[in-house]
Amino acid sequence: MILWIVAALVFLLDRWTKSLVSTHFFPGESAIVVPHVLWWTYVQNTHGAFGMFGSQPVLLIGLALLVLALFAYAFRDAVRSSLIVRIAFGGIVGGAAGNIVDRLQHQYVVDFIDFKNIWPNVFNAADSCITVGVIVLILASLRAERKRPVAAADTLTKWAADCGTGSSALQVR
């Protein structure tokens, strides 16, 4: 349930911020938010993430759906057992949905967050949620991987004890 609540909130935030930008700015127009650091710059982005994959909306929508399906499959067990993974995946789903709606509606994605002197690409709230969600999924995956060897070592130690060897050479620490 929390996954879908987060997805809905991210989707609504994304749609709202893009609406504000597209109604108050002309394409290419920019306004300083934090001097020398952050601008709102209205960009109609016809390309995929980081300017990749050309400007084919159908291909980009298909890729987004494929990546969502792959993530859902890869993290299916983690989604069931981890609240943080459900929240992260909700951010990814909500962000992807926001960008997909833009492509269906306009044939481009509305981008506006611009760190001109720090980052070369302009992006939006959906992109931010997708990026943070992916980072959290990677960290959760690494954490799970780090836990697995400990569990395997415990299993090996138990097995050695059950065999009645009594040999400390078989105990893994």
Image (cartoon, grey):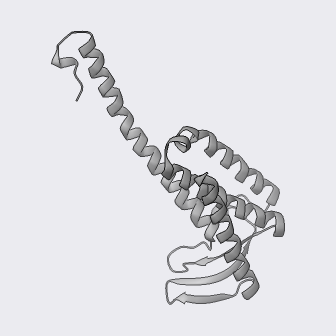
Q: Residue at x 63, y 65 (%)?
A: 9
Q: Is residue 136 visible?
A: yes
Along the line of sight, which residue is nearer the eye, 99 or 90? 90
Q: Residue at x 40, y 45 (%)?
A: 143
Q: Seen in the image, is 143 located left or right of residue 19?
A: left
Q: Quadrant of the C terminus?
A: top left
Q: Seen in the image, is 149 located left or right of residue 54?
A: left
Location of residue 121 with respect to 77 vertically, above or below: below
Q: Residue at x 65, y 43 (%)?
A: 70
Q: Whole-percent x and y of residue 66?
A: 71, 46
Q: Seen in the image, is 109 located left or right of residue 173?
A: right
Location of residue 140 with respect to 32 vertically, above or below: above
Q: Whole-percent x and y of residue 59?
A: 78, 54
Location of residue 146 with respect to 29 vertically, above or below: above
**Hey, which quadrant is residue 40 in on the image?**
bottom right
Q: Whole-percent x and y of residue 8?
A: 66, 61
